[in-house]
Image (tube, coloured by chain):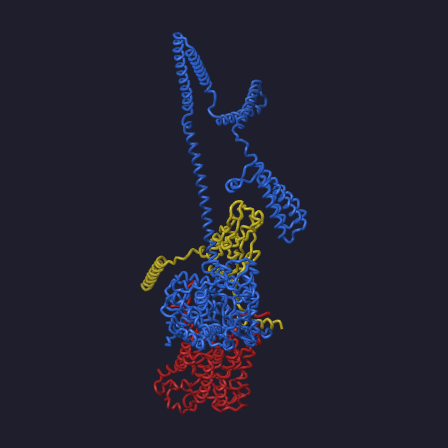
Chain colours: A yellow, B red, C blue
Amino acid sequence: MSVVIIGIGVLLALCLACGAILGFAAVRFRVQGDPVAERINALLPQTQCGQCGYPGCKPYAEAIAGGDRINKCPPGGEATIQALADLLDVEPEPLDAEGGEKPPMVAFIRETECIGCTKCIQACPVDAIVGAARQMHTVIAAECTGCDLCVEPCPVDCIDMIEVGRDLQGWAWERPLPPGRLIASDAERAA
Amino acid sequence: MALPRITSPHAHGPNRTQRVMLLVLAAAIPGALAQCWLYGAGTLINLFWASAVALGVEAAALKLRDRPVAFFLRDGSALVTAALLALALPPYAPWWLTLVAVGSAILFGKQLYGGLGQNPFNPAMIGYVVALVSFPVPMTQWPAAHAVGLLDGLQQILGIVTLPDGWARATALDVLKTNRSLTVEELWQNPAFGHFGGMGAEIVNLAFLAGGLFLLHKRLFGWQAPVGMLAGLFVMSLLFWNGSGSDSHGSPLFHLLSGATMLGAFFIVTDPASGATSPRGRLYFGLGVGVLTYVIRAWGGYPDGVAFAVLLMNMAAPTLDYYTRPRTYGHAKTQRGFKAGD
Amino acid sequence: MSMPKLWPMPGGIHPSERKALSNREPIAQPPLPARLIVPLGQHIGVPARPLVGVGAPVLKGQKIAEAADARGLPVHAPTSGTVVAIGPQSYPHASGPPAEAIVIDSDGLDRWVPLAPSGDYRSLSREALLALIRDAGIAGLGGAGFPTAAKLATGSRIATLVINGAECEPYITADDRLMRERARELVAGIEILAHLLGPERVLIGIEDNKPEAIGAVSEAVAGTPFMVVSVPTLYPSGGEKQLIQILTGLEVPSGGLPADIGVLCQNVGTCVAVHDAVLLGRPLISRITTLTGEALQRPMNVEALVGTPIKDLLAFAGLDERRLGRLLVGGPMMGFSLADAAAPVIKTSNCLLAATPEELPAPPPAMPCIRCGDCAEACPASLLPQQLLFYAQGEDHEQLQAHNLFDCIECGACAYVCPSSIPLVQHYRAAKAQLREQADRQARAEQARLRFEARQERLRQAEARKEAERQARAEKAERMRAAQAEAPADDPLARLQAKKAGVGDEVKKLKIEASMAQVALKKAEKQLAAHDTPELQAQVETLRRAAEQARQALDEAQAKQAAEPAATPTAAPDLKKIKIEAAMLRAQIGKLERLELPDNAERAELERLRTALGTAEAQLRALEEQAQPAPAAAPNDDLKRAKIALALKRAELKKAEKTGADDEELAPLRAALVEAEQALHRAEAASGRPAPEHVLIDKRPVSAEERARKTERAYARAELHKLERDPAASPEALVAARERLARAEQALAAQPLDS
């Protein structure tokens, strides 16, 4: 009988000791990571376009941290979904947007038509439009996130969303076909 | 003027995968000839049968994987696997044994991993080990030199007749392995032994050495892997060579010229896809194969250990690559791995 | 010639050199091209700004475009002639899109601008010398075309100046011929650079497959401390980093510059250009270009003017178009294929290679990587190309960076040796571009996030400020109310007494005044009785009147004092009281009315109450009218209403347009919108109150009418533009819109300008 008691006692002591060590380690060596919402926010494209249904990227990041779906960001597209899926360790989902993934855009104000109403300036989430009342407005292309929030408020519809083209210096080679994946295979399959 | 738009470099060296494979096949010819001279047409029949099986299985697998069949068959890698396996299997092995070995090599060793270049293990060694583990008896029946005629051999291969006992006999490594009482001096009286190594095996090994040196001369692979393997085997056998007593594991020379040593050193460990890729990694890879081969020969359950040693080292190859990454130009020291967020 | 120690370079390959094709003939002068295309941006950075207009005559060497920023370079006219165009022209680039350029039609005279050579550059300051080099438009002629002055202006101390004459790329012999023929100029150029940098040693690295060049340069450097070093032929030993490693054993740190290790590398061609600029005053308007390849009948080196169309040069070298398989700018290892031979030669075009299909066959289809490791052995940067390929295919960006993808110099040695013919360099280029783009996106996202957060913060602060102001106002109002309420709050009776006392005081004062006036009058009457003078009579009269007035005032005040308690102190409590009174009366009337059988007394009471209620209500109405503010806001309300109406109409129209309503349905809506607009304008005119920002911003006063007309014109123009852009717009609508615009413009024009 005493063997049983000794055994239980030893196990109990072991449990307490280990628990104490683990508890100490948990407090002492705590890893201070970014809150998950911050890390999600870092992956979002920060266009602040609100196409996800939230007023900006950070609110959406907080919503994702709170359990919302990760596929609501059209500007980020598949790449962002993949990154979010990797971060949160969930399955990537197809993009939930009507138009699908859109190429990067930049707003352009047709300046002859602008009546200087400042509505777009108020709508711009990143202050990328300059101008004053009754003065022509213009978009700082380098700061524009292409969120198209300025298009709707314009009373004279003088704002266009233009696809961002690549210039000579931004041009790059495309990825070649992976080895073994070749034109010959197509030819063979067609034959 | 519609000129093609291709990224640099526009010039290309003469080397091609196909050429590599053909050179390997050419370098195997001396070894094959030596085997034919010793054991008769069995090796030749093996070669043809194995090649046919390999091409058939490869084509079927490619078809199933919806890949261009003719394009990949032309690369010659299936033929190389078949040839190496045919030279490693005992001559006059029954047809089904070759079928199983070559079929497993191509199917399980290569195609299931994604085909050429994707295999983590040497396909020929996979086939060999599958056959050795499944059918140990026919796999160890090496014929005595000049013992079997063409017709008998053919019948044996096809399983029509079973040759009388005595056509096959234990190899020198077998004899050494099972030896309990005889000293090495006495063992050399055994017909299984030749001048330096196993009877016949020494000639075959020398032939493979010649082929390997030809490949080395052609710069098909670096010297690191073969030298590493031979050095590993040599050093181990030298360290544990305790003269000629009955508990001896054999002399270094004996080990270098017995079993599949030279075939392995020049045709198996030099397989690029399943081995390490950096020169230093290849040296270690070869050394590992050499050491493991000796360990298995001396203390393992099988008389020869090249196949197992190669497979074991295949598993270690990524680790070897990881630890032998060269220092990139302009970097103070080798960077290993990566930290997330770097 | 003592041989300095050479260090080994890892990797490298020996492609067939094919240099004998073009290095036999001396450098030729091609005929002057009829038309030159001079691109404004010939290197990394912002393109230069043109200084000349179309039609302007230019002289050879005249500056025709100025650097757009500190790191840019000016552009000079390569020959005399006329500027015929400034705009996008074909450009030698692998992708083929055009780039801004100045097109010059040569006049055939090749007249120079007056040159200003600086005879003694040693007397010039460092800055002046650098400015001279920069103004001459000198860029690195070896490959990347980095502005030379910017490279020379490095802050670090340069211990070793490396002059790159290795020219390791196959086919190219431009530097070879240059060193053979212009060794003297080369050495003079190096002397200028050495004077600028003050290095401890100058090493001129030349590959040992150019013995004539080594001989010529060795001869020219005699008597100088410069050292000619023959380096073993091995591609890519001419790469800047590789040559530095071979000559000095030092490695340029990853991501750094050679200057970080005290080394500076300049191409031999650049040195000659520096010589020309400083000692002859000539800007960089030409370069030595190798014309080679088996599709040319006369391969050679030419001194080509920058801007010469490539096809002119190829024609000069006898291009056989039928044999042409691939046209490259640069060598076969690092050059790029060109789709358009109309593109010009630029400062970095060191070679034009017209290859036959047999010479440079199309690459065979790529086989899977068999991890042979040949690429790793060939790599001069000791990378693991097979691993990089693996990660590039998997788009594993972290591993790509961990395997130092960005240390790849794209020399092509790996792809050259690859037995599987994998276009490794293209994989790396694509992966690098992807990584760069990703980094760029991340930077932009970060920037957008900061701006967004800054804006949120600004809005929040504005809101907080407004809130604070609102609160302050509310508090103030509260305080005032409290101050007002204080006295009556504790005792209404006291207040009444105080008021009474006030009135009493006044009466007392008036009494005193009246009695004093009386006394004065009496005194004056007494004096008048004694001495009757007209002055005294007048004085008495005045005093009497004053005394009379004082008594009257006193009487009035006393009467008022008597009436006071009846009157309520202020209007507001009046209103309230009457309201309460009326309500009570109404209640009593209601009560009486509900009686089923009222007796006479009750009926009389009811009648009296009704009359009283009538009076009270009349009183209430009068008071309420008085209390209401002036009805001046009415026009503003109109304006607001008009605005709302306009917005509603516009929304309606937009909705209809979106739902795809046809013109018939849209027409009335549009009409309604126009009407609403006009109503708005009328209201604006009627309000007469300019928008507050109008006062602040419009310096020139604009009348309401004019503004209305201008707005009308803007709307009309916007509508027209919108319709014009819309392919589905009906012609009628277009016509209508045009008419509207025309009307609006007429209305605006009809208005006198000075209004």
How many marks do you count on the picture? 0
On-image quarter of the N terminus of chain B: bottom right
Q: Nearer the viewer, residue B215 or C352?
A: C352
Q: Nearer the viewer, residue C511 or B276?
A: C511
Question: Measured along the vertical axis of the image, is residue C519 above or below residue B310?
Answer: above
Residue C54, given in percent of the width and then of the height, sits at 56, 58
Residue C369, given in percent of the width and then of the height, sits at 50, 73
Q: Residue furthest top?
A: C529
Question: Measured along the vertical axis of the image, is residue C656 above or below residue B7?
Answer: above
Q: Is residue C268 left or right of residue C645?
A: left
Residue C690: image quadrant is: top right
Question: Measured along the vertical axis of the image, is residue A117 above or below residue A171?
Answer: above
- Asked whether the viewer can see residue C613, the reply is yes
- Asked whether the viewer can see residue C422, the reply is no
Q: Nearer the viewer, residue A22 or A28?
A: A28
Residue B20, given in percent of the width and then of the height, sits at 50, 79
Q: Nearer the viewer, residue B172 or C455?
A: C455
On-image quarter of the C terminus of chain B: bottom left
Residue B214, given in percent of the width and then of the height, sits at 47, 84
Question: Measured along the vertical axis of the image, is residue C554 above or below residue C728?
Answer: above
